[in-house]
Amino acid sequence: MLISVVPVAIKSTEQKIINPEIYSQIANLELISRKILDGFLSGLHQSSFHGYNIEFAEHKQYVPGDNPSYIDWKLFARSGKLFSKKYLEERNMRTFFFLDNSASMGFGNPSKWNYSIITASTLSLLLLSKKDTVGLWLFNKEISSFLHPSGKRSYIRNICRFLEKAYPDGKTELGGSLFQLASNLKKRSLIILISDLFSDQESLFNAIRILSHKGHEIIVMHLLSNEELEFNYEGTKRIIDMETQEDILIDASYWRDYYKKTLSSNLNKFNEFFSKSSVDYMLVSTKVPIEKTLFNLLYRRKRGKVHVVLS
């Protein structure tokens, strides 16, 4: 199989999955996010990982010699393991969503843009419920707009209104936008980048190196539509670049193998670079329900603000 989307451990027959058609029509982003989060939390408890809980706090595992007054005894009661809360006080990181709103994100059914803003708003709702601080940045050829970070639960309304007004437009310049972000973020932060990564790779990689060097933690959600992943087109098709409006006629059947080889090569480059850079990289298909994407993201986190601990 050419492309392997991250496997899911939740039993699909046991969780309440939102119909993906809802992703195509955004009427009330906050309501959609709350429904998806409810389904996600319900599925988490009903899954094969029953008995596990997502802890949104950083803890350092206790070792002899650490100050015992910082032991989190509540966490010990749930997990049977000793963790120090002192680590949390030392690493009070903020989370910033860095969303690609270039024209190419409007492609697909559901569109990558709708999928990305629902994912971001749902994760924001989850983080705010745990009293974490959340901010938002949008970019295309440069940073186009941003929302200052806040830790108030009610801030989810500001986030949803902000995202509901935005739309995909313009060309992508991911590397330059990340350089801008690096110069604006003064405090160490967790950055969740959601993009189709249709931009110059070397510029992107250089920007990631700078962000990592400055101590920022980075999660990359590489979002592609099912059409882009599978390329199941037949016959003569007109291919239009959504960012430049340039078009070309192709024989889809003839070009399919070349397209898939090129895509596979690019994905391998992303996997190799992000793995070496200690960046948490996920390839996400818009055909995968968002609840499953959230579960995959939270479960696979081995460092940073999200841990899976026995409860």
Image (cartoon, rainbow, N blue to C red):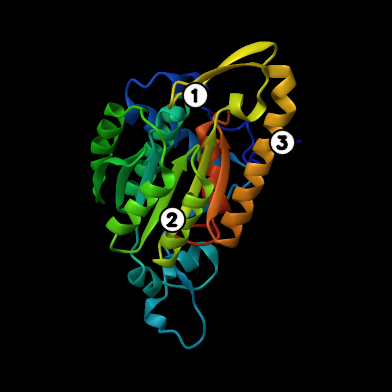
Q: Which amino acid type is shown beneath numbered disc 3?
A: Lys
Local SS, label 1:
loop
The residue labelled by disc 2 is: 207
Q: Residues within 10 Å of mark 1 (few under 14, many from 20)?
A: few
Marks 1 and 2 close (CB-CB < 8 Å): no
Residue wearing tag 3: 261
Q: Position of residue 20 (x, y in %)?
A: 51, 23
Q: Quadrant of residue 165?
A: top left
* 189 versus 227 height, above or below: below
Q: Does residue 96 appear left or right of residue 47 in this picture?
A: left
Q: CA distance from mark 3 to mark 2?
A: 26 Å
Q: Nearer the viewer, residue 31 or 182?
A: 182
Tell me the quarter of the picture where residue 263 sits: top right
Q: What is the number of the mark on residue 241?
A: 1
Image location (x, y in percent) of residue 269: 63, 49
Q: CA distance from mark 1 to mark 3?
A: 20 Å
Mark 3 Cα shell of 10 Å, populated few (<14), some (14-19), many (≥20):
few
Which residue sits at x=64%, y=39%?
A: 5
Are the residues at dot 3 and dot 2 in contact (C-beta closer than 8 Å)?
no
Q: Kindly indicate the quadrant of the structure image that contains residue 188.
A: bottom left
Horizontally, residue 1 falls left or right of residue 96, namely: right
Where 82 falls versus 270 (above or below)? below
Residue found at x 55% / y 68%: 80
Residue located at (46% from left, 39% from top): 195
- First of labels 1, 3 by sequence position: 1
Q: CA distance from mark 1 to mark 2?
A: 25 Å
Residue 289 in the image: state x and y as whole percent. Answer: 54, 30
Q: Earlier in the sequence, mark 3 or mark 2?
A: 2
Q: Does residue 3 appear in the picture of this structure? A: no
- The residue drawn where x is 51% and y is 22% is 108
